Amino acid sequence: FFKSIDRILSPCFAPTDYDILRARQKSLALAETVFHFRGFQIRLCDVDGISTVKKKWLQCFEDVAAVLFTVPMDTYDVPAKDTEDKTELEEAMESFSAVCRHPGFAPTPVVLFLNRRDIFRNKLKVSSLAKAMPDYKGSSDHTEATHFLKRKFEALAGDKKNFYDHVTCAIDTASVRSVFDSVLQVILQRSAEIVPKPV
């Protein structure tokens, strides 16, 4: 934003899509957003993985069309806020495992977004994934490291049949649009299953 400070401070400033994508605001509780995509109204509930929330939010949802679980890949070496002996990525993995094992979500599709692939790629050059995760035996190559993380989450998903994963960069709008098109198909299929049939 500093490069655009003159534009932002202008009295007639209107944020661009890029500005909005860069202005991430952490939610401190359950936040609900309703938006339209491809002619469908979608209600998105963001729990943000906050520890005080995540213990409770699993019980808050019934008959959801899908669980979208976003993990910032570059947090493999960032200490978790609640405990110093874990990283944010390890905490995310625990939460993800809890979602996949929760009986209430047994029929619910779980879609994993391994996000911030651009930052992850750059960070691997200066911070070793193998040092943060000793079971990683690969190099600093981002493709190899990404494949490792995908396998870790696939193992946590266990035998869940309706599990999907995508490697994303949230500010790459073309990529996100394409991914969301495929996610929409999952949501529509599940919605058809949970909407009561007319008698």
Image (cartoon, rainbow, N blue to C red):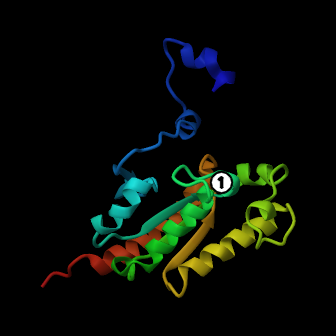
In the image, farthest residue toward the right: 139
Q: Residues within 10 Å of mark 1 (few under 14, many from 20)?
A: many
Q: In the rendering, at what x and y percent does residue 129 appear? A: 78, 61
Q: Is residue 163 left or right of residue 47?
A: right
Q: Relative to residue 26, is residue 162 depicted above or below?
A: below
Q: Is residue 158 left or right of residue 49?
A: right
Between 45 and 130, which is closer to the camera in this rendering?
A: 130
Residue at 74%, 71% in the rendered image: 147
Quarter of the rendering occupied by the C terminus: bottom left
Between 42 and 147, which is closer to the camera in this rendering?
A: 147
Between 30 and 196, which is closer to the camera in this rendering?
A: 30
Q: In the rendering, at what x and y percent does residue 41 appear? A: 33, 57
* Helix, strand or loop under label 1: helix
Q: From where the camera sits, is residue 34 visible?
A: yes
Occupied quadrant, residue 157: bottom right
The amino acid marked with disc number 1 is Thr
Residue at 60%, 63% in the rendered image: 90
| Count of numbered circles on the image | 1
Q: From where the camera sits, is residue 37 visible?
A: no
Q: In the rendering, at what x and y percent does residue 113 appear? A: 57, 63
In the image, farthest residue toward the left: 199
Q: Is residue 183 left or right of residue 106?
A: right
Residue at 64%, 49% in the rendered image: 172
Between 118 and 175, which is closer to the camera in this rendering?
A: 118
Quarter of the rendering occupied by the N terminus: top right
- The residue indicated by pointer 1 is 75
Q: Relative to residue 183, is residue 162 depicted above or below?
A: below
Residue at 58%, 55% in the rendered image: 176
Q: Relative to residue 121, is residue 198 depicted above or below?
A: below
Occupied quadrant, residue 124: bottom right
